[in-house]
Image (spheres, rainbow, N blue to C red):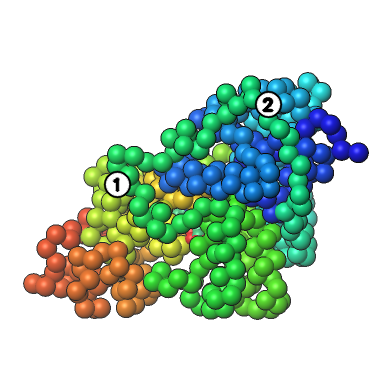
Amino acid sequence: MPDTAPTIMWFRDDLRLGDNPALCDAVSRGRVVCLYVHDPAFPLGGAEKWWLHGALSALDHDLRAQGGRLCIMAGDTHESVLWLAARTGAGAVVWNRRYGPRARQVDTDVKAALKARGVDAHSHPGNMLHEPWQVRTKQGTPFRVFTPWWRAVQAKGPPLPPLPAPDQPAFAVVPPEIGDRLVRPADLALLPVRPDWAQGLRAQWQPGEAAAHARLDAFVAERVHGYATQRELPAQPATSGLSPYLRFGHVSPRQVWHAVETLGPGDQDSACFLSEVGWRDFAHATLFDFPGMGTGNLRPEYDNMPWRHDPVALRAWQKGKTGYPIIDAGMRELWHTGWMHNRVRMVVASFLTKHLLLDWRVGEAWFADTLVDADAASNPFNWQWVAGCGLDAAPYFRVFNPVAQGEKFDPAGDYVRKWVPEIAHLPNKYIHAPWKAGPSAPGGYPAPIVDLAGGRARALAAWKAL
Ligand SMILES: Cc1cc2nc3c(=O)[nH]c(=O)nc-3n(C[C@H](O)[C@H](O)[C@H](O)COP(=O)(O)OP(=O)(O)OC[C@H]3O[C@@H](n4cnc5c(N)ncnc54)[C@H](O)[C@@H]3O)c2cc1C
């Protein structure tokens, strides 16, 4: 017999009904109250806020279609969860796990407080292929390098198959006196006003579970074939564009895995794609095992790196006005759409931390504010990887030359022409080095803000002196 006391399903980074172990648990216990807490102590970037507004609206819509609703509360997480549990007379609160240090601390404290009040609390594995502690070296220690970690993941066989969305869930009626503390997405002031800078985001993205599956289905049907060879070309729509959907949990990595794996073992494209999804797990596992990753160098010797303070150069980078077309195209794509192609993310991050010798944390902070997929694990993990201070990092002396990278990965200049229209008229031979065009060099497009050879030499000298 199901419990008569309702169970609270506490949604966080898992805003979906399908393959949601905590939700399945809640439904199996009886009537369900669905909760999301918006806590200012967990600040979000501007683009993430824009996404969250749409994500909460979509989840509420999907729950209402089943006869339920999403109860949204604003305020301190601990207090909100305990308050709602007390007011609804909940017998249990369930959730899917998070892996960042602060989130884990809050979850541990909430669990203890609920149990002390006689309320059952249960956490589930819902957001990774495998839990971080399930993939260990033979000595039982965390992996520090991706390739052996990935081999160990593959040796475990496929992740568990995804769970179907609960069939005809029963929802508890929310008492009216609780309604006063509930808010609507619009009350959270997540959308930008004056100025409304989200036009480009609206044109490109539709938050929610239905849109996530439409994108996954289209990727599997049309684009996964060719992924291995095309994924490095920013002008091609060759990658999945699933990152914000995975970030907010509209789709689970297990759903992605099983949708792609059906293409058959040994398929080079799907194997390449799945290893990219693996990097996401590896980033979260690294954050779990090295909780200081978000702010501190994983290699402490980098604590002595003589990063420069140069607000003018930083502003030029942020605004896409460095005078290097591939950098400016990437930074403008980011500003306009809330997303940037992975290859270009690596090139702009290398330029910031090496040619400009600016601290990776200022770049990470800009990405955190402007990416719709900004993620507390993947973002610092990748910045540290590019900057050389990560565990399994690219060596610091590998300095991407933005001209050579542009010529290699955007050979016809299509990506640059799309995002840097003021130089679109230049022939291909100048499109990645417009200053060489002489009299036909475009007025208004900035001259390079740093000399490439000089910037590279300065960076390498700083690194050698460490
Ligand atoms: C400096 C820098 C910062 C980054 N910050 C983020 C971030 O905040 N959030 C984020 O999701 N990704 C981040 N990435 C990783 C990567 O650029 C994006 O995941 C990818 O570009 C998203 O596009 P996609 O969904 O089309 O990727 P696809 O190529 O289709 O890959 C499928 C999925 O695999 C995962 N993935 C792919 N590459 C990586 C990677 N290197 N690390 C972790 N996961 C990966 C993503 O979830 C992605 O959606 C960053 C990369 C760099 C170099």
Image point (68%, 44%), residue name? 67
Residue 359 is left or right of residue 299, and the answer is left
Distance from label 1 to label 2 (Cα)? 52 Å
Identify which residue, 142 or 287, lies in the foreground.
287
Q: Check the picture and name the quadrant holding the N terminus.
A: top right
Tell me, yes or no, if residue 453 can be seen here. Answer: no
Tell me residue 375's x, y (percent): 52, 47
- Mark nearest the camera among 1 and 2 is 2
Tell me residue 419's x, y (percent): 30, 64
Image point (48%, 76%), residue name? 230
Rendering quarter of residue 2: top right
Tell me residue 304's x, y (percent): 43, 41
The secondary element bearing badge 1 is classed as: helix
Amino acid found under the numbered disc labelled 2: Pro
- What label sits on residue 68 in the rendered view? none
Mark 1 surroundings: few (<14), some (14-19) or many (≥20) residues within 10 A: some
Image point (54%, 44%), residue name? 57
Residue 130 is left or right of residue 202, and the answer is right
Figure check: 74 above or below 56? above
**Which residue is identified by label 2?**
175
Report the label total: 2
Amino acid found under the numbered disc labelled 1: Leu
**Which residue is identified by label 1?**
314
